């Protein structure tokens, strides 16, 4: 009987190839369902909106530059050590799909709920969620601003639920309010309030909303809606 030896990387790679299509399908189904629930549009328009976000996530619009760090690299060639010094800039940008589009959608939802929810409790839910997200967010060198994924949507859902109860507003508004509070509080609490600390990240492009990928802003809105459905 022959014995076959497989490199350790084969099994993880095999699992990724098997699981990835299901994750993509789940993302498409969940995203389109959430948009249909929030905006009352048909599935084809929901898929179009989701596609715009996916394509937009590849686009970063630079806002401004800051002085980065001096990068020192040493190379050893034939026993001689060479030092190369280079200055790296820090560019702050905004991502179209990960930030701009979700914020625009949140503004649309804000118009839908503004007359039904007390502005005082609406602002209170936003500030409470923003402060908690700010407390958990941390700048990481070479990565950006990171925050535990479950915290922003969970806090946004709870804050939105309390705002609806105190306003005596229909609980059916919870998904819409959770999405907009989750998105706006993540933009404000995790990104905007931490801009003064971006020098700690070092160098590169710091994109609000992600650099070609989804960061916490868009996913916070999606997960906040999913959490809110459990409370209705």
Image (spheres, rainbow, N blue to C red):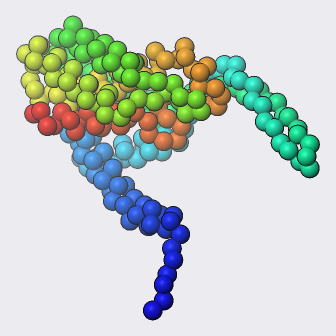
* In-image side of 14 versus 35 (left or right): right
Q: Nearer the viewer, residue 60 or 48?
A: 60
Image quadrant where residue 121 sits: top left
* In-image side of 40 versus 15 (left or right): left
**Residue 180 visible in the displayed image:** no
Image quadrant where residue 152 sits: top left
Q: Quadrant for the C terminus, please.
A: top left
Q: Quadrant for the N terminus, please.
A: bottom left
Residue 129, position as x, y percentages in the image: 30, 19
Residue 7, position as x, y percentages in the image: 53, 69
Residue 50, position as x, y percentages in the image: 37, 44
Residue at the farthest bottom position? 1
* In-image side of 20 versus 29 (left or right): right
Figure disc tally: 0
Q: Residue at x 20, y 24 (%)?
A: 158
Q: Residue at x 11, y 13 (%)?
A: 166
Q: Residue at x 15, y 27 (%)?
A: 173
Above-or-below relation of 78 to 169:
below
Above-or-below relation of 116 to 78:
above
**Residue 214 visible in the displayed image:** yes
Q: Residue at x 59, y 21 (%)?
A: 200
Residue 101, position as x, y percentages in the image: 41, 32
């Amino acid at each position: 009987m022959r014995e076959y030896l497989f490199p350790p990387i084969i099994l993880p790679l095999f699992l990724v190839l098997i699981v990835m299509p299901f994750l993509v399908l789940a993302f498409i189904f969940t995203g389109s369902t959430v948009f249909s629930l929030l905006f009352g549009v048909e599935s084809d328009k929901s898929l179009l909106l989701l596609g715009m976000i996916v394509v937009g996530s590849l686009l970063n619009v630079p806002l401004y530059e800051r002085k980065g760090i001096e990068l020192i690299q040493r190379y050893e060639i034939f026993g001689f050590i060479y030092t190369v010094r280079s200055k790296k800039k820090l560019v702050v940008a905004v991502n179209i799909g990960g930030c701009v589009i979700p914020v625009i959608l949140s503004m649309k939802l804000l118009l839908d709920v503004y007359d039904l929810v007390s502005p005082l409790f609406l602002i209170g839910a936003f500030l409470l969620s923003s402060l908690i997200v700010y407390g958990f967010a941390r700048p990481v060198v070479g990565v950006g601003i990171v925050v535990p994924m479950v915290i922003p949507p969970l806090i946004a859902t709870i804050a939105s639920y309390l705002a609806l109860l105190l306003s005596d507003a229909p609980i059916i508004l919870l998904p819409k309010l959770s999405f907009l509070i989750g998105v706006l509080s993540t933009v404000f609490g995790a990104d905007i309030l931490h801009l003064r600390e971006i020098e700690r990240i070092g160098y590169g492009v710091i994109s609000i909303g992600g650099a070609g990928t989804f960061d916490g802003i868009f996913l916070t809105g999606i997960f906040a809606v999913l959490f809110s459905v459990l409370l209705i």
